Image (cartoon, grey):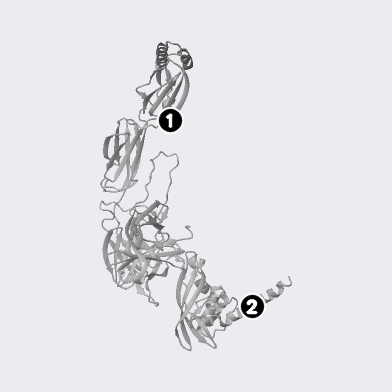
Amino acid sequence: MKRALPIVIVLVAVTVLLIFLGATFGRSSGTVGIASGSALPGFSEHASTPEQALSNFLQDVQRRNWDRAFASVERTSEAVNKLDFIQEWTGTNGGLRSFSSLEKYEARPLHATNSEAQMRVRMQWTTPVGPVEDVRDFQLAHRGDEWKVVWNQTPPPNVPAQIVPVNYLRWDLVSGTSNDQWGSHNVDSPHVRIVSMNAIDSAEGTVVMGEVVNEDTVPAFVNVNSTLVDASGNPIDDESSFDKILHILLPKQVSPYRIDFPNASLAKVKNVRMDVKATLVPASSDPVIGIMNQKLEQDAQGRSVLHGEILNQTGETVNIPHVIASFYDNNGKVIWVSDGYVQQALLPQSSQPFAVEVPKSVAGKVQNFHVVVNQYSLQKS
Amino acid sequence: MSSSINTACRSPKVSLCWIGAVLLSLAAVSMAQDIELRVPSGAVAGQPASISTTGGGSATFYLEGPSIALKRDVQLGQDIQLSAREIEGAGRYVATICASNCSSSVFFVAAGKPSTLTFLVHPSRAPVGQPDMISGVAFPFDEFENLIFTPETVQFQISSKESKLASHSVETQNGVAWFRTSSGKSAGAVQVAASLNDVQARRVVQQVASDPCRLQIKAQRTPKGVEVQTDPVRDCAGNPVPDGTIVTFTAKNGDQISTVDAPIKQDVARARITAKGTIVISAASGVVMGNEIRVGGQ
């Protein structure tokens, strides 16, 4: 015991010293002009630079220290209250952001003068559907002896109280009783067909993609599976479309699908076996979501991005919208399928922006695109 | 016995002795073969039958069939009665009787009168106006669920509420009768019936509309955007396309595209498009394209 005490004292002293050194000099080893989320909990340095101000702000957001974060920003409109500010970061109505947390961020200056600055922040969120990246530009202003984040976000539009008439249309599934005679009550599975398939080699491995259509008059729960086969006829790998498909297809509805085979080289693949499974499920035709103002453009970082707005045309909240886009070349062949989750819930009669990325290798060949929206509603799950 | 013969035949008159032994053996064999089974030639499942035997004395009777295996003590020379229950299963039976020796015989039991028809019809939903769209298969069974292999004539009938649409008479081959026919022109339920004597089985096939024939749309600009809707969507035979069928509206404004997948409700699909300026709207459902309309900006 007597021997252990000096060791404990030494360990504590070394730890305190390392913490001090880290706090004082740690930032200096990073790239000049890039702030990243690594400050010590409980410490906030004086915002003498735009980077420091933004870093302090994002750390408060990360720690959900809303009082200090809200107090540190300069609001451009009094209409933005603290609740709106918090909901911008924490999400509402069961949206994906409600289940997410800011894991890390990286800020780069875009423009700076003595009185104002603009910073671009790449934020990495952890979500139930995997990591989601969000890029946002922040304005900063020099006020007195410190820099402040200018909060110019407009408050989310309030959905007015209203009555949305709905001709409710849904399909229920009634299973026959077990004592029925064999073959007397057979209801066939929905007729679903793969209308196109394309296998390509990408940086992550082999990707199999295409489109599937429900040719029946009833809804279908659809899953597409694919098996890569080598020259000797042996299976290399098999995967399913997982979430990169519109699983519930209404009659005559078309969905893109994408199946990723990480670490599988297309050069070794001789054959691709496709298998589509369709089952009868109860379904509803609502909500109807329109995809407005779709445009393929280059974003500020030079990436090809298809962006637009999704518009909920019915009276039902979509908690987690999931956008899936298929891209076609000039022959109408599907050359890529992208997807992305919209982080905020889609309220009735309101819209949310979306953006999905197209790889550079594909972007130049894209002639047309088709976007569908998967709907995850907490009421239904 | 053989040991006594061996002892007796050590005498000088060896050859005569051996001849006597062989004759005795042949006599014993011929005694054993005298047990004869006369199995029924036209046994029917579920109907009593009998097997006659020859000889005398007690013996053990074995019966092995598709769904039975039994053992019974019997008296040779008397008929062995098989109850209806013992030969319910149609197929091959082996009757064996054992006294000092065993003898066996094979007989077949045929299925009885048709009692049920197992009737499979495919598909349960058939688009109208498609050739060879509906097929049905009937299997006649007797009351003991034996498939009837003897040729029987099955009558297939397809009828709607209003009228009888088609009829086919088909003789079973190896216990199966089947038909294939085109779907009708009108959407709605049709009844498909298979009958054999007084046995009948019915199934219902839902005839559904085919792909939309002429997709016509109209649009109107409102303060909230452009309200676009189809005319009542029907197939080429005039049947309304089922509610829930997706119609995709596409609006193009330069290089901007807006799309809405809207379900048909009460024969009409509606959507709202918020694109500004002059837009060109088109509609499609499955592989069918509709007309294009141009809507001017406000």
- From the viewer's side, name the closer residue of B183 and B30: B30
* Residue ID for mark 2: A14
Q: Would residue A136 be visible to someone looking at this image?
A: yes
Q: Are marks 1 and 2 in contact (CB under 8 Å)?
A: no
In the image, what residue type sits under mark 1? Ser
Q: Position of residue A69 (x, y in %)?
A: 55, 77
Tell me: residue B182, above or below residue B110.
Answer: below
Quadrant including the C terminus of chain B:
bottom left
The quarter of the displayed image where residue B63 is located: top left
- Secondary element under disc 1, as helix, strand or loop, is loop
Q: Position of residue A368 (x, y in %)?
A: 31, 67
In the image, what residue type sits under mark 2? Val
What's the CA distance linking mark 1 and mark 2?
A: 86 Å
Q: Residue furthest right?
A: A2
Q: Chain of mark 1?
A: B
* Residue ID for mark 1: B67
- From the viewer's side, name the closer residue of A96 and B96: B96
**What residue is rendered at 74% in x and 72% in y?**
A2
